[in-house]
Image (cartoon, rainbow, N blue to C red):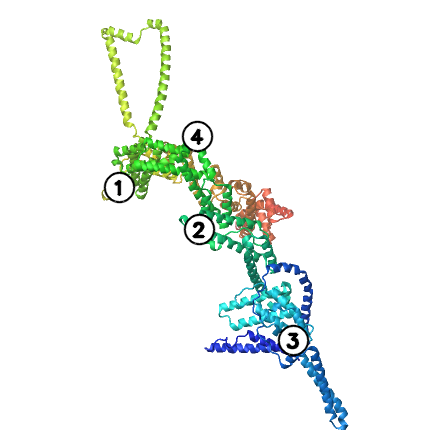
Amino acid sequence: RPDDGDASATSATRAHDASFEPSATDRRPRDSPKTARRDAFVKRIARHRSCARARRAMMTTATRRPATTARWTATRDLVKKNSLRRTRGRAYAARVRASAPEPPTDRASPFGFEREMDAVEKQIAALPTAARLGAYGALVALGAGLGNAVGSAMPANVRGGAKAALTAVVGGGAAYGVSVADKKRFTAAPKSLWNSLQGRDPLSVTAEEVNAMGAKFGIANMGQSCATAMTELYDVYLMSLVPQGLDPVQGWEAAALAQFRQTLGIDDASAAQAHLEAGRRLFRKRIELGSTDKETDLESRKEFQKLVFISTQTFGEEQARFLLPWKRVFRVSDAQVDLANRDNASQLLRTSLSKSNAIANVDAAAIASAADYKASLNLDDDAAGEIAQDLATAHVAGIVNGTITLNKERGSARDVGTICKNVEQVLAYNVKLEGAQGSFPGVGPVTLFGGEFDSKMTELKDVFRTYLEEGIKGYSFSAALNDNLGKLRLVFGMGNKEADDIILASTTASYRLALRDAVKSGSLDNAESPAKVLQGLCEGLRFPPEVAAGIHEENYRTKLESIISSNKKLEDADVEALARVRKLLCVPKGVVEKLHFEICGEIYRTAVRSALSVPTESFTPALRDRCKAAKANVRLDDETALKILGAEARKQMSGFIRTSKSIRNKTDAQKEIRKMIFYNQGVVTPLVQDVTKAKAEAAAEELASLLKEAQEAAAKEEAEEKAKAAAEAAAAEPEAAAEPTVDDSLRSAAEGQGFASDTPKKVEEVKAEAATETAEEEEEEEEVVVKEEEVPHQKEVTLAEDMDVVTRQAMYREYLMFCMTGDQVNAPMGVRINIERDQSEFKRLSQLGDILGLNMMEVGQVHKDLADKAFRTQAEQMLGDGRGLTADRAEKLKEIQTQLNLPEDEAQKIIKGITSQRMMSNVQQQIASGTLDAAEVRKMIEAGVEIERMIPEDKRMNLFRKNAERRLGDGSGSADIEALTGTLVEDLKIDGEKAKTELKNIAAEKKRSQMIQGVAVLRQKKAADVLLCCRNLVACQAVAPEAKLEWKVESEVFDMYSVFVQECSDVEERKVLQSALSISDESARKLEQVVADGAFKFSEDSLDEALF
């Protein structure tokens, strides 16, 4: 039976729940059936909830289940155990309280209405304790007196008993009524306390006031005696502290609840039930409102999460895990509970850090206080670190956004000094954060990488560039500036390449300005070493020397282009100006040559291109002179001019080659190549000669000087020889006087014939005529030589770099074939006739080799390949009939070899290859047919044929197998059996062990087949065939003696042996056959004796003798 206190609590709880339910005025108008159904559902839920509360209120401590009682007992023990921990943690709580927010003083009281009391409760509340107890005694006495009076009025015979009974009954009833009325004070006291709290801040109530209220009603401990009603007060205050909707938690709620709970004197277990009931209320609210509206559903979720967080902070994480079974009651996971605690704790920590500016000011004391506050919130380091990083990033982002706005301004509004000051402020802030690293999770240098600044990377680069340009205004890139730029790059989240590009671009612009000032001021002209001045500029700006060299090259290029674009030629003054620029900027010679090749060479290239674009017959000296004038105007050296000319000429000649490749007819294609040769001779060669004329003249002068020195040396030697000869002649003059000379002899002969007076004159005339004839012959020879001289052609421009050597050799080979076959002409009816070949084509062939850039070795290789091909064709025609190389054929091939100038070893190699190929084809046929025996293999080996290269290994093994089968079945017995196992294996170049194994297998198979065949012919009375099978058995036994042979009919075995003994007298072969047939020595001896005595008669022989 429930007591009156629980019943009163039930009604109070119902009244409290009614205050949280929507009123009739707040409900939606019933404008649709859907709304009506919803209201009906809400009413049913409300009735069901009221019944459930009534049932819970009816349960007393005595009627609870044992398990529930045990759980409540364990809860109380845990609360007592943790009370000591709370006492020890008061000092730490005091430190945390300094960081935690204070409750506001202007909050409305949750006890906004007065609780009504019934008449008994009002009387109990109005009476003091003594008066109340006297009233109780008076009522009991009045009841007893009334019963006694009624009993006295009863008949005399029952008066005594009736008086006692009525006195006891009426007195007992009065006592019971007094006891029931006394229980009302347990409900009147909490209501009186409620009414006293009306309009007051619950935190202003003290424990003394609560104890005084209990003492007024005679209750020593209201928290224990009126646990349900006091918990209701706590529940009301709890619900008022849970922020509604999306309002955040303020942070002071847990401390306020703990204070109010301590003031009321209720234990943790009862308070925990209030928290769970509040959770049920919020959960039901969410169900009743529905989840169709996402915003409403989100607010309901947030309210429940805030309740979970406040409850955890109120009881502590460890105790809340036991007292508040959220997972079991509300079917929520541990992760969801942790999420609720983490989100609300993060929000409180963020608010605390923002208000204290601990992160923005990097205040060590404020950061330490925030760390204690974080520990009190049980917030993990990762979440706290994210908050600290967000706040620090937001602080830096605010400064950077302002800097970006300033940097976007134009004109006087763009304050570069403020921009640089803001950047340095950000860097200084990062330095402070780095110093405070470790004092709080997440405190450290800030980077803006990611987030909103991903789309502002261009603006960040502009700020970076502005700060850099301001720092290097004085053409000096300090180490401090470099360090700041590295830190700023990390803050902005820029990559190394992006920052390096900006630094390079800014320093490049600064270096250009510094270089311009140095040239204008004359410091470079007056410097002893311009290179040192330029090096100083590069070191001051930390500028790469290679980039500086590129700027110098660009400046020289600009100067040269301006001169060429205005004058189209270089004057002496222009050359001096270019030399000055080159000296000041230290431009290397190679760079100067490259620029002149590109810029000045373009003038010459245009003239050369126009000259080379005309056909061979249209080339005129005017075009040639125009090219020479263009070269002279831009003062190109011969090497550069030749390079330009060569490039353009190769393009034109490549056009001829492309045209020839597009022609299908080979003769017409080679005619196009011939046009290229004429083009090279008539157009390219004169232009090349103009370019290389100075070089040729220098070479001629050098050659002339060498010849002059050689002539002087020869004249000197000749003079010395003449002097020596004159001395010898003077010494021999007396002897010469005694002997007549040739002239004297002629004169004497003339005088003898009557021509004495004319002799000297005639002799002189004869000598003059002989000299004249000799001179005329020499002039004729010179004229002949001049006529036979080749037309000069250039060799400097070749196509060696444009085509590979194989392609160039192929072109040369095709033109060589064209020279050998001759030209073709078109005859009537579409016939093409070969005309007599022109020998001058071979001279053009030589020019083609020079154009293609072929050396003597490569040309010789082409001729050799053609000679080899021709000789091979002739040899294949002669040796194709298979009759071999006869003496006549060898002599004929020798003549062909001499005509083709083919070396002897090459000719023999070709002949050997052809014969080997023919032999190989024959060998393949013999192998396929199985007719190739060991003797022919031996002949091939002796002829020098490489068997292992011509025949694969599997075919060689197959050949060995066929020869073995043939040898073991030819009836020759064991004679020369070693040739099968030794010579043939060596000739075929096969593995000996493998051949031996294969031979044994063949012999074992052959032995069985020969035995069967021998018995068959024995039964047919064919003695010669029996002897042949026996000899084969002897051969197989010699090869594979371990292979055993068994035959069931012993008489047939004896007859085979007797036939063999009768025909063969070789004792060794008899022994081998005996072993093969498994005949014992005694049986063999008896059989041999029978044959020797003539007692063995083969049946066929016996029949013949009987006939005769």
Q: Spatial distance from mark 4 to mark 3, Cα to Cα?
A: 109 Å
Q: Quadrant of the N terminus?
A: bottom right
Single out the mark in the foreground, 4 or 3. 3
Indicate the secondary structure of the residue bearing disc 4: loop
| Residue 864 percent location from the top left of the image | 38, 35
Indicate the secondary structure of the residue bearing disc 3: helix
Single out the mark in the foreground, 3 or 1. 3
| Residue 411 percent location from the top left of the image | 40, 48
Which residue is at a point 44% across and 51% down the rendered structure image?
406
Q: Hey, what amino acid is under mark 2?
A: Leu
Residue linked to disc 3: 189
Single out the mark in the foreground, 4 or 2. 2
Foreground residue among 911 and 1106 = 911
Q: Hey, what amino acid is under mark 4?
A: Glu
Residue 740 placement: quadrant: top left
Verify CB contact (< 8 Å) between mark 4 and mark 3: no
Indicate the secondary structure of the residue bearing disc 1: strand
Residue linked to disc 4: 528
Chain-order first, disc 2 or disc 1: 2
Chain-order first, disc 4 or disc 2: 2
Can see residue 58?
no
Horizontal relation, residue 505 to residue 131: left or right: left
Give me the disc on residue 406. Answer: 2
Q: How dense is the environment of label 1, judged by Cα within 10 Å: few (below 14), some, or many (20 and up)?
A: few
Q: Hey, what amino acid is under mark 3?
A: Ala
Verify CB contact (< 8 Å) between mark 1 and mark 4: no
Indicate the secondary structure of the residue bearing disc 2: helix
Residue linked to disc 1: 832
Q: Spatial distance from mark 4 to mark 2, Cα to Cα?
A: 46 Å
